Image (tube, coloured by chain):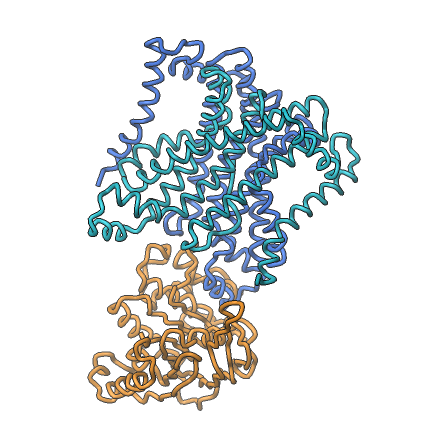
């Protein structure tokens, strides 16, 4: 049986969505502005976008690139972060470089990378990779750094090699922190993807948004905002499910998601 | 145990390496200078630009948007975060809304902001504020809701009325978290203002990059990008200094 | 009512032990239930009644989980009891107040304030002028043995020093009752005995009422006029023992005193007889 409190907790975000859409509806009815359609009009336009084969293929292609960029970033960043967390030398080697890269707007590299690699898949995936890497490295680093020294001593006493200790002790112990980084990284992958599409104006969700804006199809603009917003919220919610399942043993995480672009 | 200077040299190595590789690519002709200008050339170009009035105008436009957006985010984030931690009723409303809005890619709202607020400062400042708001709000909330109960009890026993507890205890006790959120928010502000200007603008550093990209001026693409990154580093360092002053009593600060 | 002393040394009141003892705190059939999960309740305190006389040093002694700290928090007004009531000088306790000053095991010093800033906090909240509060606080800091550390931050002090600051911070607003929640529990044995001695010396000067929570039998017997023994699950008062040992007490004399030894041994035996001996510490 689910307690009423749990029901309220599950229903709250849904209610919040409805509330936000209602606020939008009221605001647009009040403003009576041509460039601000009501929430209902925007929602009605959503099936048109998703029904249009070309834009659907476009969006799916974007998501595929996003998944690849995110996947590569995670595969590279987690081992690097863990190594940095366990080795002072590795940490002091990479930390200043990462600190310098930190404030660089990654999506802004799009035009420069386009200049070198053209407008192909590689460019778009590379930009997403860059956008995702830092938070994943940072959180893996923090997670590995916080691993109890004595746990590693016990491991060494049991005859585990350095690599085995990294994989079998540090990785699981740092997993909650790593997954927090991945969660931030996932939202960032989406943001980087859309932003770079807005800048490059070649294809994808970001491009659809600005094409519609240029052509004055305001319903489509707002419908696309709903689609992208829903993607962000769903990706985050799904990942949170996975995360909670993987690290059931760890202390319950602070449950407001921390994410940023 | 390594000395600090050894650490610093080790840390500088990859940065030097990147620049050296960059220089080598140009010198040995692997990359044509049109696509990848030599680092020295980019650097002198940056210094040249920094003293021109036109470039300073771009920097000023970017900074105004950055600071305005960041300031709004700090004021809203800290007050909503503290309020949500202090009042269960506000918490019940804020929490689900934040859960929905935090993972939403704010940049997707930019077209709507352009339609509603125009192509000038308003839309960009709002986007910066929207993006910087959540890390600040969440850290404030986290800090304020994990204030040690006994600090509050100690202050109450000393005769602090309940309404003053928020300012006398909760706010200063949450300060480490708040400032961590502000640091994240500040760097986000730098990034977002630049991207917003790249997407659509008539001035600002981001616009300078796009203009250069349209004319394939590789050097002039690097200059604004490096400028905004340096601004980010400098502002981050300044906030770091403010932070270590404000938190001089806190352990690990 | 708060009498603000005119001179900084006035907080040391003359010893008034000749005055007939009157009840300052009355705990009347207090029970405390905590909800541990949706279906389970935990009875932390069951039907506690206790009267504490003015000027008495009373220890509450018991195993961890017997609710002794909760009882102290109820007197402090930080927690309201599920049933029953606590009174201070005949007035029902409804919340914290400067007449009851807590000292916590965790010190709970304000990390953003210096030693002086922490000690001055109470007087400033009471409306004492800055110069007055400054002078009083400096005198108190000297009394707890931390002269020269006024401008240090808590993070720069050892645990024992932090607890001295916490004591000074509480004494600074002249509470009538000191509520000490295992104040020396986080300190090493050596620091602990030094602070016990110093606490007794300070207490001898004005004999404030002290309610002292501890799980150490030695500590309770050494410090107190009265030891309230509690048992757990549910938390009840098991026995109240008057400690009839001369004051002022000197640790080196007392440890050799057969009467002291008998109190300690008797109390330990009583705990052993109940089933919770193992969890006493």
Relative to A67, residue C212 above or below? below
Please state the total of marks drawn on the protein image. 0
Q: Nearer the viewer, residue C256 or B10?
A: B10
Q: Nearer the viewer, residue A5 or C180?
A: A5
Give the quadrant of residue B195: top right
* Residue that appears at 38% across and 41% down: A140
Give the quadrant of residue C142: bottom left
Relative to C256, residue A179 above or below? above
Please state the horizontal and vertical placement of residue A250, each as a whole percent of the image.
41, 54
Please state the horizontal and vertical placement of residue C208, each as a whole percent of the image.
41, 79
Please state the horizontal and vertical placement of residue B23, each as a whole percent of the image.
34, 15
Q: Is residue A214 visible?
A: yes
* Residue that appears at 52% across and 63% down: C125
Q: Which chain is orange?
A: C
In the figure, the shade used to draw chain B is: blue
In the image: residue B126, left or right of residue B225 = right
Please state the horizontal and vertical placement of residue A70, each as a whole percent of the image.
46, 33
Q: Which chain is cyan?
A: A
Q: Nearer the viewer, residue A128 or A60?
A: A60
Point out the image quarter for the N terminus of chain A: bottom right
Q: Is residue B63 visible?
A: no
Relative to A207, residue C197 above or below? below
Relative to B215, residue C105 above or below? below
């Amino acid at each position: 049986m689910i307690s009423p409190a749990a029901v309220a907790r599950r229903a709250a975000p849904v209610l919040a969505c409805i509330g936000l859409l209602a606020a939008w509806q009221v605001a647009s009815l009040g403003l009576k502005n041509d460039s601000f359609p009501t929430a209902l009009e925007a929602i009605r336009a959503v099936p048109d976008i998703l029904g249009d084969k070309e834009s659907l293929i476009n969006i799916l292609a974007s998501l595929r690139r996003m998944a690849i960029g995110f996947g590569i970033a995670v595969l590279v960043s987690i081992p690097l972060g863990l190594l940095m967390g366990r080795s002072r030398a590795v940490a002091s080697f990479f930390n200043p470089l990462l600190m310098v890269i930190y404030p660089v707007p990654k999506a802004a590299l799009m035009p420069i990378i386009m200049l070198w690699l053209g407008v192909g898949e590689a460019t778009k995936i590379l930009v997403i990779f860059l956008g995702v890497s830092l938070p994943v490295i940072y959180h893996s680093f923090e997670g590995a750094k916080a691993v109890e020294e004595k746990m590693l001593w016990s491991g060494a006493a049991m005859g585990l090699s350095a690599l085995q200790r990294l994989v079998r002790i540090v990785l699981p112990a740092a997993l909650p922190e790593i997954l927090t980084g991945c969660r931030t990284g996932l939202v960032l992958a989406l943001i980087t993807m859309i932003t770079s599409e807005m800048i490059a104006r070649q294809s994808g969700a970001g491009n659809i948004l600005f094409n519609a804006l240029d052509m004055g199809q305001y319903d489509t603009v707002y419908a696309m905002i709903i689609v992208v917003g829903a993607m962000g919220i769903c990706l985050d919610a799904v990942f949170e499910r996975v995360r909670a399942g993987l690290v059931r043993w760890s202390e319950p995480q602070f449950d407001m998601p921390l994410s940023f672009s | 145990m390594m000395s600090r200077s050894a650490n610093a040299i080790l840390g500088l190595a990859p940065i030097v390496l990147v620049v050296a590789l960059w220089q080598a690519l140009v010198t040995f002709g692997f990359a044509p200078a049109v696509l990848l200008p030599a680092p020295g050339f980019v650097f002198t170009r940056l210094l040249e630009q920094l003293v021109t009035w036109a470039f300073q105008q771009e920097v000023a436009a970017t900074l105004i948007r950055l600071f305005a957006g960041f300031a709004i985010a700090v004021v809203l984030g800290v007050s909503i975060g503290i309020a949500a931690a202090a009042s269960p009723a506000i918490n019940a409303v804020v929490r689900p809304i934040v859960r929905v809005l935090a993972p939403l890619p704010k940049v997707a709202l930019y077209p709507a902001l352009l339609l509603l607020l125009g192509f000038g400062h308003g839309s960009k400042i709002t986007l910066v504020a929207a993006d910087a708001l959540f890390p600040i709000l969440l850290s404030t909330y986290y800090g304020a809701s994990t204030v040690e109960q006994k600090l509050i009890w100690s202050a109450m026993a000393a005769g602090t009325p309940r309404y003053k507890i928020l300012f006398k205890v909760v706010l200063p006790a949450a300060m480490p978290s708040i400032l961590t959120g502000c640091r994240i928010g500040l760097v986000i502000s730098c990034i977002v203002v630049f991207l917003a200007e790249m997407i659509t603008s008539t001035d600002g550093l981001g616009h300078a990059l796009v203009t250069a990209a349209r004319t394939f001026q590789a050097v002039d693409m690097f200059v604004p990008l490096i400028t905004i990154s340096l601004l980010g580093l400098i502002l981050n360092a300044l906030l770091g200094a403010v932070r270590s002053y404000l938190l001089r009593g806190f352990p690990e600060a | 009512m708060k009498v603000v002393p005119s001179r900084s040394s006035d907080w040391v009141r003359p010893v008034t032990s000749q005055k007939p003892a009157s009840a300052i705190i009355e705990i009347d059939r207090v029970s405390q239930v905590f909800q541990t999960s949706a279906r389970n309740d935990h009875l932390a305190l069951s039907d506690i009644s206790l009267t504490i006389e003015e000027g008495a040093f009373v220890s509450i002694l018991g195993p961890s989980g017997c609710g002794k700290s909760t009882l102290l928090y109820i007197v402090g007004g930080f927690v309201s009891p599920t049933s029953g009531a606590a009174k201070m000088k005949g007035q029902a306790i409804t919340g914290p107040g400067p007449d009851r000053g807590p000292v916590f095991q965790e010190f709970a010093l304000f990390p953003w304030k210096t030693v002086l800033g922490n000690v001055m906090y109470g007087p400033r909240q009471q409306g004492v002028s800055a110069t007055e509060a400054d002078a009083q606080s400096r005198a108190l800091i000297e009394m707890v043995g931390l002269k020269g550390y006024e401008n240090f931050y808590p993070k720069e002090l050892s645990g024992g020093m932090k607890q001295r600051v916490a004591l000074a911070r509480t004494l600074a607003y002249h509470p009538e009752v000191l509520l000490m929640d295992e104040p020396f529990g986080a300190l090493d044995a050596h620091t602990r005995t030094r602070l016990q001695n110093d606490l007794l010396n300070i207490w001898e000067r004005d004999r404030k009422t002290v309610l002292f929570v501890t799980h150490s039998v030695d500590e309770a017997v050494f410090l107190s006029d009265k030891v309230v023994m509690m048992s757990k699950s549910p938390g009840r008062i098991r026995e109240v023992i008057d400690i009839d040992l001369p004051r002022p007490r000197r640790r080196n004399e007392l440890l050799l005193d057969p009467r002291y030894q008998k109190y300690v041994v008797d109390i330990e035996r009583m705990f052993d007889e109940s089933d919770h001996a193992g969890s006493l510490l």
